[in-house]
Image: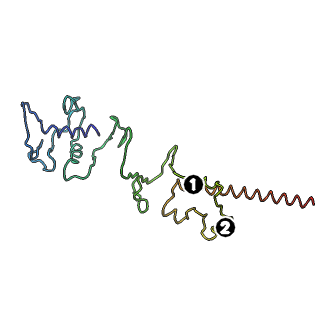
Amino acid sequence: MKKSINIIFAITTLISNISFAQTANTLPSTGYAGIGTTNPSGIAAFTIIGVANQYACDNKPLFEIDGVQSQTCVKDLALVRTWASIFGPLRTEFVIKNTGFVGIGTATPTRTLDVAGNAAISGTLRLGATAANGTFANYRLSVDGDIVAKRVVVQTNSWADKVFDKNYKLQSLMDVENYVKENCHLPLIPSEKEVIEQGIDVSEMNKLLLQKIEELTLYLIEMKKENQNIQVQLTNLKNN
């Protein structure tokens, strides 16, 4: 793609210095120029229509600018016109209508879009046929389908180890029981309705689940101590 965009730059530069076996040829600073047409579109400064469908495909460079030659082979000028349209004042879209592969950072793409190196997207990215909507419409990445990965790292600025702090107030099991009976879910854990409407924050959910595991651990430790005390009391009663 980089080479193709360079073609457009080369065409624009060529306008100011076209030579047809003359010592100099200068175009006026206003108006429109055309190749293959006597009636330029009036949208862009430079219009190509119906010119031979082959340039630089015979191992000859397409352009030479300041001693640098472009080896790009363009067989479909419709593609060039599509790219060139982004420079027109009435164009807001950039659509590649040609078939084949497009490479960014690679001269040998093997897929519809092949990017070699890093890519930065400042807006949103959608993968799949159906866009996310409602609560999820403005997420940076929307995937309509499954995701597979060998490893996923989620950054977080907090974790659940506060449960083991000596000042942590652990709810009594009776309070937990009453809450569950009334709400049908554990304290701090979102309800089924909330999950369906808002989804699950993986980082937050893992933290909450760990918090519940740590609380269960404290309950078990407390119950073990109670059992040990009961055993001691039973032993004392038996000995007496």
Quadrant position of the C terminus in the picture: bottom right
In this figure, which residue is indicated by the disc labeled 1? 207
**Is 201 or 132 nearer to us in this picture?**
201
Relative image position of residue 56 (x, y in whole percent): 21, 32
Residue at horizontal 22%, vertical 42%? 80
First along the sequence among labels 1 and 2: 2
**Vertical order, 11 against 143 (above or below):** above
In this rendering, is residue 232 above or below 84?
below
Disc 2 on helix, strand or loop?
helix
Rendering coords of residue 50 (x, y %): 15, 43
Q: Amino acid at mark 1?
A: Lys
Q: Is residue 234 above or below residue 13?
A: below
Q: Residue at x 48, y 49 (%)?
A: 147
Q: Secondary structure at mark 1?
A: helix
Q: Estimate the x, y position of residue 71 in percent, counting from the top left.
A: 24, 32
Colour basis:
rainbow
Tell me the quarter of the image containing the N terminus.
top left
Question: Of the residues shown, which amino acid type is indicated by label 2?
Answer: Glu
Q: Is residue 136 above or below residue 5?
A: below
Q: Which residue is outermost to the front?
A: 167
Q: CA distance from mark 1 to mark 2?
A: 22 Å
Pointer 2 local density, CA inside 10 Å: few below 14, some 14–19, many at least 20: few
| Snapshot quadrant of residue 120 | top left
* Residue at screen point 20% across, 35% down: 55
With 111 as the anchor, is 234 left or right in this view? right
Which residue is tagged 2?
177
Q: Position of residue 108 (x, y in %)?
A: 34, 35
